[in-house]
């Protein structure tokens, strides 16, 4: 394989998604020479519901400007989320601050990464890295040609199956549970589900994560389950349930997309932030909001990774020390969403479940709690319960989640 002379940059970012865009924006604005690697040709498809949180929307507008028309699906916005339970109780909740955008990730990601000002090397696959202590040597491949880079810092923003994470910790991805998440697109015959809302089912018989919403005159029916299961079987079960219980009638699926996800780290405060001159951010680090909205925490954690590098350079401090101090705020915000103490006594989400739940009758409240307990039982094999409770108690007593659990 032919190799050219190494390309020298200040920062190399692996990935060209929202976390990468946010990091790049901070770094480029600080005057640094930054390159982003993307293994596919841009713009590229991205498996995602596209329903952005209010916080993520604010970040995009404040940092990148008004969203162009091509970055949105139809309906162009989402009013809120509706929780559905096996007892057939449904709880609709509007997002704080009004409707939020329904992003077309293929074009919204391309828009943000180009708006950031970063130099993009797409169709380029990251292979490996070596941190010398003074900088990082990186090998990549493009069209059969090996490309070498030297960088002062590297940011891994390449999603759940992060190649950068694997390069730093080869056995890490084998040590955590993985879930398959798939969604099918079907033309609508009849759908009583309100198209202004993202719909989520707390139903143990449907899967670990089950959702539906409208997109471009089609209905998305999605399901998440432990890796190794059969997507078509799981989807057929959900489709049958939606027809029988909600009157949803759909034509056969025209398209399917799916990917694997790491749901666990944000629940139990087991994030992975890298080591030495290599930072991990976004979903690669384990950030994932409740209801599997990962875009807002990807944007904010990516920006923090960029800020950490700028500050470390300005103050001549170890970048990991700076990053882990700054990222603690995003850890609190993300893990709070899964924290039962925060859910009961606070309001860690951007849709007010506590108020909506309070409007139910006493009988309905008891029924919903029973449904939630039954749903959570399907997560028992992962032994997350005790860890969630212990982390919740530490958060209550210290005001922080312990950083000694982070890699």
Image (cartoon, rainbow, N blue to C red):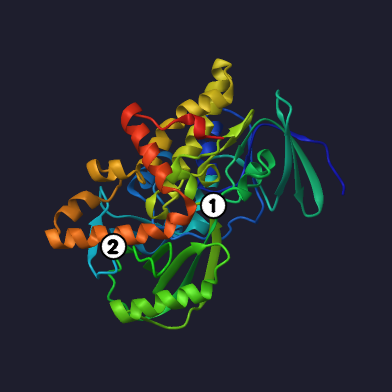
- Which of the 4 image quadrants contains residue 36? top right
Foreground residue among 223 and 268:
268
Pick whichever of labels 2 and 1 is earlier in the sequence: 1
Q: Report whether residue 65 is seen.
A: no
Left/right placement of residue 407 relative to residue 55 reads right
Q: Nearer the viewer, mark 2 or mark 1?
A: 2
* Image spot of residue 101 (x, y percent): 36, 55
**Along the line of sight, which residue is nearer the eye, 385 or 257?**
385
| Left or right: 53, with 224 as reference point | left
**Residue 336: which numbered mark, if any?**
none
Residue 351 pos. (x, y %): 27, 51
User: What element does badge 2 sit on?
Assistant: helix
For mark 2, does the 10 Å Cα neighbourhood hold few (<14), some (14 to 19), or many (20 or more) residues? some
Q: Residue furthest top?
A: 315
Dot 1 falls on a residue whose secondary structure is: helix
What residue is shown with label 2? 371
Badge 1: residue crowd in 10 Å (few <14, some 14–19, many ≥20): some
Corner quadrant of residue 80: bottom left
Residue, x 26% and y 43% (percent of image)?
A: 347
**Residue occupying the far right of the picture:** 2
Q: Is residue 275 left or right of residue 281?
A: right
User: Taking the image as drawn, is residue 143 in sight?
Assistant: yes
Image quarter hosting the C terminus: top right
CA gap between label 2 and label 1 equals 41 Å
User: In the rendering, at what x and y percent does residue 313 appear?
Assistant: 58, 21
| Residue that numbered label 1 is attached to | 110
Question: To which quarter of the image does residue 216 belong?
Answer: bottom left
């Amino acid at each position: 394989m032919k190799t050219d002379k190494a390309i020298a940059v200040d920062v190399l970012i692996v990935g060209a998604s929202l976390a990468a865009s946010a990091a790049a924006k901070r770094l480029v604005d600080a005057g640094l020479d930054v390159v982003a690697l993307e293994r596919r040709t841009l713009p590229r498809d991205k498996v995602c519901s596209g329903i952005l949180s209010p916080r993520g929307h604010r970040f995009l507008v404040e940092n990148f400007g008004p969203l162009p028309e091509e970055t949105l699906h139809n309906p162009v916005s989402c009013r809120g989320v509706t929780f559905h339970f096996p007892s057939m109780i449904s709880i609709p909740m509007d997002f704080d601050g009004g409707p939020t955008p329904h992003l077309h990730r293929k074009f919204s990601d391309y828009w943000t990464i180009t708006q950031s000002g970063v130099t993009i090397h797409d169709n380029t696959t990251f292979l490996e890295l070596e941190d010398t202590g003074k900088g990082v040597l990186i090998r990549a491949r493009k069209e059969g040609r090996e490309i070498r880079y030297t960088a002062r810092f590297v940011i891994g923003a390449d999603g759940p199956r992060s190649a950068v994470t694997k390069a730093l910790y080869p056995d890490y991805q084998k040590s955590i549970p993985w879930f398959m998440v798939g969604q099918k697109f079907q033309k609508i015959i009849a759908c009583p589900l309100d198209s202004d809302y993202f719909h989520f089912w707390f139903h143990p018989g449907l899967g670990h994560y089950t959702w539906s919403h409208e997109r471009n005159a089609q209905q998305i029916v999605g399901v998440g389950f432990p890796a190794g299961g059969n997507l078509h079987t799981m989807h057929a079960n959900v489709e049958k349930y939606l027809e029988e219980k909600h009157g949803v009638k759909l034509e056969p699926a025209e398209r399917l997309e799916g990917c694997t996800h790491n749901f666990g780290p944000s629940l139990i405060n087991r994030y992975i932030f890298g080591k030495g001159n290599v930072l991990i951010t976004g979903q690669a680090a384990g950030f994932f909001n409740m209801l599997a909205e990962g875009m807002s925490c990807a944007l904010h954690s990516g920006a923090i990774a960029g800020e950490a590098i700028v500050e470390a350079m300005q103050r001549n401090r170890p970048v990991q020390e700076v990053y882990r101090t700054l990222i603690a705020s995003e850890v609190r915000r993300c893990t709070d969403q899964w924290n039962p103490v925060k859910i009961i006594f606070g309001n860690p989400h951007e849709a007010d479940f506590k108020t909506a739940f309070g409007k139910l009758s006493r009988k309905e409240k008891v029924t919903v709690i029973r449904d939630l307990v039954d749903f959570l039982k399907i997560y028992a094999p992962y032994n997350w319960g005790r860890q969630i409770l212990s982390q919740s108690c530490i958060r209550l007593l210290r005001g922080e989640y312990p950083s000694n659990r982070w890699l």
